[in-house]
């Protein structure tokens, strides 16, 4: 894998809006190498739009995103793609392709215009296919994959891109419980090796297990950011999800469950 060199991503007074509504107002953070930030909130709270803004594919209402000291919008797209990758919620297969051909798209930012993939590029792709439990499927047509296999393929493509910063929009979509754990463990290991991971998640307990900080989005401009032990509690999560959340002691840590009161 290509080495990661002390990345950072900063939000400076970032505001994310849709017509008639401010979703996130004046967001500020500075995330350094090794950080794993989970974004939590109800449907429609602005998790995806915030990730798209951090990725530079959507313009902020105000404020700025910086990679290192360089404003995101000043970076050429290919250069940006070497540093940052976005996994969208859903992906579409426009053209027929094999698993290997699809994963190799992740290497394009690292390959010159008139160059072919090197043996090293192919080996990176094979490693990422294997890490997503797709070994033996390299020659399969993508159209023959199940929904969960297709999701893991999209993740393998992002891993093959080998950026410094991963922006993941609900990476556990369509995955069974074991693959949810496997996927998040892979990204936790990437963070442990110096990358930055920012992931929107619906499962509070997965966020508590794999992330070290959480960003809570309330959908009305308000937000809370802090370490898991500070922001993940019954009061904050009950307010966030507009339903009573109860902490249950399990083994050596807490699990959060929705308590309807019935």
Image (cartoon, rainbow, N blue to C red):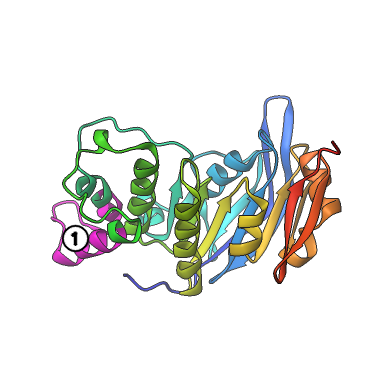
Q: Nearer the viewer, residue 239 or 59?
A: 239
- 141 lies left or right of 204: left
Marks counted in the figure total: 1
- Judge from the rendering whether residue 104 lies leftward or rightward of residue 162; answer left or right: left
- The residue drawn where x is 53% and y is 45% is 170
Name the residue rendered at 40%, 42% in the picture: 148
Q: Main secondary structure of the magenta part?
A: helix
Is residue 187 one of those drawn in magenta? no
- Percent across and percent down for residue 217 are 72, 45
Q: Picture coordinates of residue 18 (x, y %)? A: 66, 30
**Up/down of 1 relative to 37, above or below:** below
Residue 260 in view, yes or no: yes
Instruction: Name the residue tied to disc 1.
Output: 122
Residue furthest toward the top?
20
Image coords of residue 161 (percent x, y): 34, 57
The quarter of the picture where residue 226 lies is bottom right
Quadrant assignment for the C terminus: top right
Examine the rendered structure and indicate whether residue 17 appears above or below residue 233: above
Left/right of residue 76 with respect to residue 191 in the rendered view: left
For the record, the magenta segment spans 105-128
In the displayed structure, would residue 93 be above or below residue 182? above
Instruction: Tell me what residue is drawn at x 61 percent, y 44 percent.
Output: 50
């Amino acid at each position: 894998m290509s080495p990661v060199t002390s990345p950072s991503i900063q939000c400076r007074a970032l505001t994310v809006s849709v017509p008639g509504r401010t979703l996130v107002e004046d967001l500020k953070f500075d995330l350094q190498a090794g950080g794993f930030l989970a974004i939590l909130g109800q449907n429609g709270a602005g998790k995806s739009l915030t990730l798209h803004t951090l990725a530079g594919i959507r313009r902020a209402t105000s404020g700025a995103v910086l990679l290192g000291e360089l404003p995101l919008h000043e970076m050429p797209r290919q250069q940006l793609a070497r540093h940052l990758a976005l996994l969208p919620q859903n992906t579409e297969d426009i053209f027929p392709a094999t698993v290997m051909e699809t994963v190799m798209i992740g290497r394009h930012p690292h390959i010159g215009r008139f160059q072919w993939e090197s043996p090293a590029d192919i080996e990176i792709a094979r490693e990422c296919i294997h890490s997503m439990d797709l070994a033996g499927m390299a020659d399969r047509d993508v159209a023959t994959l199940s929904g969960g296999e297709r999701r893991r393929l999209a993740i393998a493509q992002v891993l093959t891109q080998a950026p410094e910063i991963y922006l993941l929009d609900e990476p556990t979509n369509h995955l069974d419980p074991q693959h949810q754990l496997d996927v998040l463990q892979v990204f936790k290991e990437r963070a442990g090796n110096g990358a930055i991971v920012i992931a929107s998640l619906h499962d509070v307990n997965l966020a508590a297990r794999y992330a070290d900080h959480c960003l809570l989005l309330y959908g009305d401009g308000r937000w809370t950011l802090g370490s898991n032990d500070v922001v993940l509690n019954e009061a904050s999560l009950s307010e966030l999800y507009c339903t009573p959340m109860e902490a249950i002691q399990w083994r050596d840590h807490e699990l959060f469950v929705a308590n309807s009161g019935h």
